[in-house]
Structure formats: structure tokens, C-alpha cells
Image: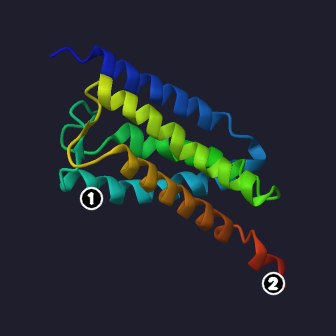
Amino acid sequence: MNNKIEYSILLAVWAIALTGLLLVPKRHRRKAQVAFLFQQFICWILGLIVVQNNWLDYPVRELKRNYSSLTFEFIAYPAIAVYLNIYYPAMKTKWTRLLFVLAFPAAITVVEIILEKNTELIDYHSWSWYWTFASILVTLGLSLVFNRWFFREGKSAAGETS
């Protein structure tokens, strides 16, 4: 089977994600590193659970012994989490923050649906787009909470004295 299109997509995702990581402004690099590593940790665990339970699989992947998607779980999704964390509009209204956070899983879910329908990069078994949306929303939310906690941002940090 010829998988040139799939491998081209994977290569393009790597190029875009790495370029995006290189373009993180210097003042945000520490926050970006924390967000990136936290998201990799979460994705690794959840990705293994999803694949091992045969809810979905990745027929075309980079590593033959790793049945999860190295590209999505270790580079693309963590890179997206970086941008969510460094540009999160903390000082905006609740509706603005909610729409900002919802835009990320919505965009990722749309791309995943297109890839699932048109390529061999992902196959749903007992999985559906709403599970993708929900899992991405939850993990990105955890990333935001962890990053804000790690850097002592937010309401709890305002009342603390050193």
C-alpha cells in the first residue's frame, strides 16, 4: 500500500509544529516548556489507554512498536497546548476565555474528522468526534490549570505574601 500522502502529512505536521515551537517569544519560553512537557505526559497516558482498548488506531504511524501517534501526542498537540497557554486571555471576560478555550478542541476535532475520513492516519472503532472534542477540552483545561498553578498565576496567587 502506498502511504505517501500520509507520510507527507506527518512530515508537514512536524515541520509546522517545530517551526511554531521555535517561534515562541523568548519571554514565554519557560511557560511554553512547562505546557509542552505537561501535555506530552497527559497525551502519552491517555493515548496508550485509547489505543490499548482498541477505541481507535493509527494504521500509518512513525514507530511500528508504538501503536499511538508519535506526531499527534508528542509534538503537534503539545505544541498547540503551548500556544493556548501563552496566549490565554486571562484578563478578558469569562465568555472570551471560554470561546478561546473551546476554539482549540473544535479546530483539532475538525482536522481529525477530515483525517479519519480521508487518510489512513487514524481509524475510529468505538470512538467518535465528540470523544475527541471532550478529551482535548479536558486535557487542555488541565494544562491551563497546571500551568497557572506552576507559575502561581490566578486568584490564589494574588492573596499570597512572600
Please name the residue shown 18% across and 50% down the image. 54
Measuring 25% from the left and 27% from the top, which residue is drawn there?
Answer: 120
Q: Position of residue 43 (x, y in %)?
A: 40, 54
Quadrant of the frame with the N terminus: top left
Q: In this view, does 101 lie to the left or right of 39?
A: right
**Above or below — where is 93 with respect to 132?**
below
The colour scheme of the drawn protein is rainbow
Residue type at mark 1 is Ile
Q: In this view, does 92 lie above or below 122?
A: below
On the image, numbered disc 2 is attached to which residue? 160
Count of marks, rendered view: 2
Callout in the foreground (2, 1)? 1
Earlier in the chain: of badge 2 and badge 1, it is 1
**Quarter containing the C terminus:** bottom right
Relative to 162, residue 130 above or below: above
Label 2 secondary element: loop
Closer to the camera, 100 or 121? 100
Q: Which residue matches tag 1?
A: 49
Q: Tell me if mark 1 has few (under 14), some (14-19) or many (20+) residues whose alpha carbon lies within 10 angstroms of its own.
A: few
Locate residue 30, reporting x and y percent: 68, 54
Q: Which residue is drawn at 72% across and 47% down?
A: 87
Q: Which SS class for mark 1? A: helix
Residue 150 occupies which quadrant of the picture?
bottom right
> What residue is drawn where x is 27% and y is 54%?
50
Classify residue 2 as left or right of residue 101: left
Q: At label 2, which amino acid type do we have? A: Glu
Query: What whole-number distance in Å separates the C-alpha atoms at marks 2 and 1?
Result: 39 Å
Left or right: 113, with 48 as reference point: right
Residue 52 appears in which quarter of the rendering? bottom left
Residue 145 locus on image (x, y percent): 61, 66
Name the foreground residue: 133 vs 88.
Answer: 133
Check disc 2: other Cα within 10 Å, few if <14, some if 14-19, many if 20+. few
